[in-house]
Image (cartoon, rainbow, N blue to C red):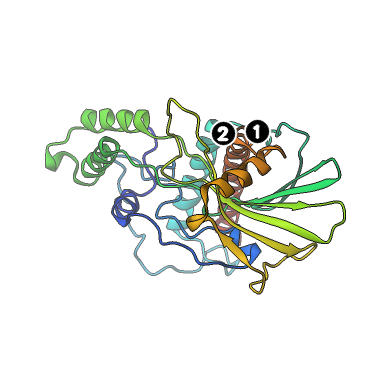
C-alpha cells in the first residue's frame, strides 16, 4: 500500500484555521522566522499504512530491556524505527535535488543549518539576502483533495465494517497521491544593501504573498513584495526599534514601485524570487530528511 498522508486531522484543522495573524515589527533576526503557518507539511509521507493493524501492547506500561543495558526498548520504539526507515527511503526517492541548486547572477551561498545567506557585490555595493526555511511551507488545500483524504481515513479506520472494501481504499489512495500538491518553501527574506562608504545599510523585509503563489496571470506581476524598509547601522545583527521603519501597507504606489525597481536593478526580481523558492524548497527537504534520520537515531539509541 502506498504511503498516505501524515495526519488528516492536522490537515482538517489547518483547513479551518484561516489566514494567519499579522506579525508586528520585530528584530531583524525574527523577521526571518514568519509566524507559524497552520500546516507546514500537510500531505507528507509520514503516515499510517492503510489497513494496518495497531500493534497490541503499545499502551502497556513499558519495562526496561531484558538485555540488561538498563535502556528502554519497547515494541512501540521498534515499530517507530521501522516506520521512520520506510519514510526516509520514500523521502529520498522523491527528493528533487540531491545537492542545493545554484542561483544565477554570481550569488555566493552560505548555509548555517536552516538559515541561508546569499551574497553579491555590484559596482562597489554589497548585497546580502538572508532567509530561514523554518515555517516556510504555506498550506495548500483543494476541496476534492481534502474529501479524498477523509475517505481514506474512514476506510482505514473502519475497514469492511463500514462497507469500504480494500480495493476501494486502494483506489482512494492512488487518487490521493495523484492530487497531492507539490510542497514548496516560500520563506520571508531580508535584503541588505550597503554602499561603498559603509555607513548605513538599507534593509528591506520581503515576503511571498500567499494569494500570489502559484497564480498564473496574463500580465506579469511581482511574485514577492516588500513589507518593511529601514536604515540600520552597518554590521548590526539586530533591527533597532529606534530607527524609523517604513511599512509599505500605506505607502504611495509610486514610491513602492521605485523600491521594487531598486531591487530589480540589483538582481532581485521575479527570476531571483523563483530561484530562491527552488533553493529554499531543496534546503527544506534536505533538512527534513536529516531530521527524520536524527529522530530515527535518537529513538534507536540506548
110 relative to 33, above or below: above
Q: Observer-nearest residue: 9 or 85?
A: 9
**Residue placed under numbered mark 2 in the picture:** 95
For disc 2, the neighbor class at 10 Å (few under 14, some 14 to 19, many from 20) is few
Quarter holding the N terminus is top left
| Residue 42 shows in the view | yes
Q: Residue at x 46, y 27 (%)?
A: 219
Q: Could you tell me residue 186's position as x and y percent?
A: 53, 45
Q: Residue at x 67, y 43 (%)?
A: 263
**Residue placed under numbered mark 1 in the picture:** 98
For label 2, the SS is loop
Q: Is residue 98 left or right of residue 188?
A: right
Marker disc for residue 280: none
Q: Marks 1 and 2: in contact by CB < 8 Å?
A: yes
28 relative to 167, above or below: below
239 relative to 145, above or below: below
Dividing the picture into quadrants, the one containing residue 27 is: bottom right
For disc 1, the neighbor class at 10 Å (few under 14, some 14 to 19, many from 20) is few
| Residue 1 shows in the view | no
Amino acid at each position: 500500500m502506498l504511503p498516505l498522508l501524515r495526519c488528516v486531522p492536522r490537515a482538517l484543522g489547518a483547513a479551518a484555521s484561516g489566514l494567519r495573524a499579522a506579525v508586528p515589527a520585530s528584530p531583524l533576526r525574527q523577521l526571518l522566522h514568519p509566524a507559524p503557518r497552520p500546516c507546514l507539511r500537510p500531505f507528507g509521507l509520514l503516515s499510517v499504512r492503510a489497513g494496518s493493524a495497531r500493534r497490541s501492547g503499545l499502551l502497556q506500561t513499558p519495562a526496561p530491556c531484558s538485555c540488561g543495558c538498563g535502556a528502554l526498548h519497547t515494541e512501540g520504539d521498534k515499530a517507530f524505527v521501522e516506520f521512520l526507515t520506510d519514510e526516509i527511503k520514500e523521502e529520498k526517492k522523491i527528493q528533487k535535488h540531491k545537492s542545493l541548486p545554484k542561483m544565477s547572477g554570481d550569488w555566493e551561498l552560505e548555509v548555517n543549518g536552516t538559515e541561508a545567506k546569499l551574497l553579491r557585490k555590484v559596482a562597489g555595493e554589497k548585497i546580502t539576502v538572508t532567509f530561514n526555511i523554518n515555517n516556510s511551507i504555506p498550506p495548500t488545500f483543494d476541496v476534492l483533495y481534502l474529501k479524498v483524504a477523509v475517505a481514506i481515513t474512514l476506510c482505514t479506520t473502519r475497514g469492511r465494517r463500514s462497507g469500504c472494501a480494500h480495493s476501494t481504499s486502494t483506489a482512494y489512495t492512488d487518487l490521493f497521491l495523484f492530487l497531492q500538491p507539490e510542497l514548496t518553501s516560500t520563506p520571508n527574506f531580508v535584503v541588505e544593501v550597503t554602499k561603498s562608504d559603509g555607513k548605513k545599510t538599507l534593509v528591506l523585509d520581503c515576503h511571498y504573498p500567499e494569494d500570489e503563489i502559484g497564480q498564473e496571470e496574463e500580465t506579469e506581476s511581482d511574485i514577492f513584495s516588500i513589507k518593511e524598509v529601514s536604515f540600520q547601522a552597518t554590521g548590526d545583527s539586530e533591527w533597532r526599534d529606534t530607527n524609523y521603519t517604513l511599512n509599505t501597507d500605506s505607502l504611495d504606489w509610486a514610491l513602492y514601485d521605485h523600491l521594487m525597481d531598486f531591487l530589480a536593478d540589483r538582481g532581485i526580481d521575479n527570476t531571483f524570487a523563483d530561484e530562491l523558492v527552488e533553493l529554499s524548497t531543496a534546503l527544506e527537504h534536505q533538512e527534513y530528511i536529516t531530521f527524520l534520520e536524527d529522530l530515527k537515531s535518537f529513538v534507536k539509541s540506548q
